[in-house]
Image: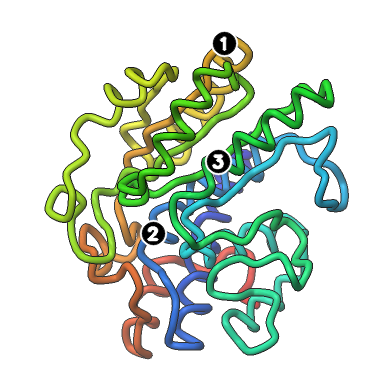
Amino acid sequence: MPKLEELQDLVQQTRRDILRMVHKVNSGHPGGSLGCAEFFVALYHEIMQLNDGFDMDGIGEDLFFLSNGHISPVYYSVLARRGYFPVDELNTFRLIDSRLQGHPTTHEGLPGVRIASGSLGQGMSVAIGAALAKKLNNDNHIVYSLHGDGELQEGQNWEAIMYASGNKVDNLIATVDLNGQQIDGATDTVLPMGNLKEKFEAFGWDVLEVEQGNDLQSVIDGLKEAKSRIGKGKPVCILLHTVMGNGVDFMMHTHAWHGKAPNDEQLAIGLEQNAETLGDY
């Protein structure tokens, strides 16, 4: 089977994992998780250079920081299926004393997770710090991060964005999940942010857009293009145009599924629309 087909199968399975995790505990954030399945699969299975095993320092490998931590279901699914921890541990999502809390945490030592996230607006600062540490360590690997578009309404982001360009943090690729939705409605209704490409460029970043953020090949190509721009004096931003709830027809194009779990009937429909590929946990 060609590599792209294998990765597409993994995207399908990731969606199944997301739906089943959130349904089991009747809690969680399926919408943004489903919309970012292609991004996470591409990043962890095609793009990032990773060491065997896991340690918090991450020296000699690429690093990823999830800023919009509420989309933890997609993060946990891809980490598990990349081998960071057993796939059947996905059964413990959001349970008391689980390592897989609703927002990622570090105190339980879950492999793959280097920061607690969920307090929105902080991940950009952390990613910049990690990128500067790599420069100090003469480590030429890349730091990746993911941010929600609604999350950019937090002011701390823009201080960090200004700092990154001002200090030529050119080993950083920050991706914005541009789905146009947030918990209270459309981003343009809650707080319009205007032209994000022009904003990032005005702050001194190199910006590229991936118009088809739910097309796996387009995401891979966009990430590879971003990598080619590393080391040229500017941090790199990818504006990734996705659909919230992608892959489950009744969850798409609406903020209603930002933080709502499917019932039994809705789960069955969602699973039917995403055929089993690798085996459920």
Q: Position of residue 2 (x, y in %)?
A: 61, 39
Q: Position of residue 218 (x, y in %)?
A: 43, 32
Q: Residue at x 43, y 66 (%)?
A: 274
- First in sequence: mark 1 vs mark 3: 3
Instruction: Give, as a three-letter code, the residue at label 3.
Output: Ser
The residue labelled by disc 1 is 233
Q: Quadrant of residue 104?
A: bottom right
48 horizontally vs 195: left or right: right
CA distance separating discs 1 and 2: 32 Å
- First in sequence: mark 1 vs mark 2: 2
Q: Residue furthest left?
A: 189
Instruction: Give, as a three-letter code, the residue at label 1.
Output: Gly
Callout in the foreground (2, 3):
3
Q: Position of residue 49 (x, y in %)?
A: 74, 34
Q: Are marks 1 and 2 in contact (CB under 8 Å)?
A: no
Tell me if residue 157 comes above or below residue 71 in the rendering.
Answer: above
- Tell me the colour scheme of the image: rainbow
247 horizontally vs 78: left or right: left
Q: Position of residue 159 (x, y in %)?
A: 44, 34
CA distance separating discs 2 and 3: 22 Å
Instruction: Give, as a three-letter code, the residue at label 2.
Output: Gly
The residue labelled by disc 2 is 32
Callout in the foreground (1, 2):
1
Q: Which one is nearer the viewer's eye here, 141 or 121?
A: 121
Assess disc 2: are there few (<14), some (14-19) or many (≥20) residues with their C-alpha within 10 Å of its C-alpha.
many
Q: Quadrant of residue 3?
A: top right
Callout in the foreground (1, 3):
3
Tell me if residue 89 comes above or below residue 252 in the rendering.
Answer: below
* Mark 2 residue element: helix
The residue labelled by disc 3 is 125
Assess disc 3: are there few (<14), some (14-19) or many (≥20) residues with their C-alpha within 10 Å of its C-alpha.
some
